[in-house]
Amino acid sequence: MARSEGSKKACCLVSEVLEEAGLDREHVRRVKRQVLEGIVLLCQWQLQRMDGGGEAARSRPKARKLDVE
């Protein structure tokens, strides 16, 4: 099935849009790496809170209910 010159595959169109927006493969890899490193840091922080944060959580003041006008 031949495609006319005017019609392109969706993946090609997406690639063109990303390229025009200045998002090349290397830039996307850098952003992906930063996001994954952020997720790892968040998970490590949560684990630290679970392991040693029990005392700190108990010493925090309780939340107060405030009337909103």
Image (cartoon, grey):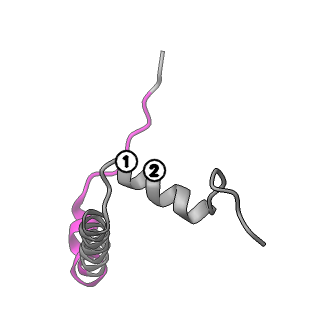
State the residue at coordinates (62%, 58%).
8
Amino acid at pointer 1: Glu
**What's the distance in space between the residues labelled 2 and 1, CA to CA?**
5 Å
Q: Are marks 2 and 1 in contact (CB under 8 Å)?
A: yes
Q: Residue furthest right?
A: 1
Kind of element beneath mark 1:
helix
- Give the quadrant of the N terminus: bottom right
Instruction: Identify the element where label 2 is drawn.
Output: helix
Q: Which residues are magenta?
A: 48-66
Residue 33: x %, y % from top left: 26, 73
Q: Residue at x 30, y 50 (%)?
A: 22
Q: What percent of the width, then of the height, locates residue 54?
A: 27, 75
Say above or below: 64 vs 35. above
Q: As displayed, is residue 52 above or below residue 9?
A: below
Residue 49 in picture, x, y percent from top left? 26, 75
**Left or right, residue 1 beside residue 29:** right
Q: Residue furthest bottom?
A: 51
Relative placement, left or right, of 52 versus 24 is left
Comparing 13 with 7, the one in front is 7
Residue closer to the observer: 59 or 19: 19
Q: Residues within 10 Å of mark 2 (few under 14, many from 20)?
A: few
| Mark 1 lies on residue | 20
